[in-house]
Amino acid sequence: MKRTLLFIALVVAGLVVGQRHSAHATVDVFLPYHYAYADLQSGDLCLARHQFWAQIGIPPASQAEASVAPVMVYRQGPGAFPVDINVLSNTGLVPRYVSDLFTEAGVLDYAMRLDMSDSVAELGAAGAVEVAKLYLLAMAANLDTIAPDGWRLDLAFDGLPPQTGLPGTPLYADTIWPYTTGSGLLAAYRAELLDRHGTCRAEVAP
């Protein structure tokens, strides 16, 4: 595992250190990312780590797309068939790359936008805000895997609906201070949404 993370860190550093650039595929690697699923017994929302075959120019941009892609598993029973367990796929969320930069200290600054327009139309305000928060948590977990020296995430939400009367911690359309590992808002969203009954598996990153 340490060797894998070191390799990923080296690939990331080699691709994006010290410069800003557009999303452009340059190399094929297996890249870790996170998606959200619901526990079958409790309904708890959990984050799970997976990997995918990425054509990388900018690793976090690839992860951003993967987190809203279907995750298919085999379902046993009569007429068995594969089912998608990623609760973030088919929600209308569209991630968009803005910029990326590795600082001289090795900290990854990543900026992106998340288009929620279709999500609001499909899920309503409450549902769209919930999946947007889950996406933010998945993206933060993604950056944890590829930026061991630290990261800062600027994630703006396009089409964020009014939240008056909605339960939970508000989601802000624009990032005032970048999200980091120790972000109080991330901690509040985790406590609000993830593993509320304590049934997420040990390998899940809440």
Image (cartoon, helix red, strand yellow):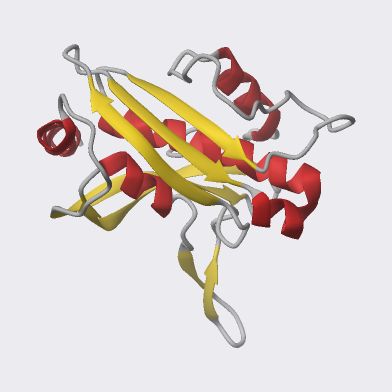
Report if residue 201 is visible in the image: no
Query: Vertically, is 15 above or below 56?
Result: above
For the view shown, which residue lies furthest in the bottom direction? Answer: 79
Q: In which quarter of the image is the N terminus?
A: top left
Q: In which quarter of the image is residue 194?
A: top right
Q: How many marks?
A: 0
Q: Is residue 206 left or right of residue 8?
A: right
Which percent across, then down, holds residue 125?
79, 45
Q: In this view, does 74 lie to the left or right of 54?
A: right
At a point 16% along the width and 14% down the height, the residue shown is 104
Query: Vertically, is 130 above or below 105?
Result: below
Which percent across, then down, holds residue 16?
18, 33
Report if residue 184 is visible in the image: yes
Which percent across, then down, holds residue 100?
30, 31
At a point 48% along the width and 63% down the height, the residue shown is 70
At a point 54% along the width and 32% down the height, the residue shown is 156
Query: Vertically, is 73 above or below 45?
Result: below
At a point 27% along the width and 33% down the height, the residue shown is 146
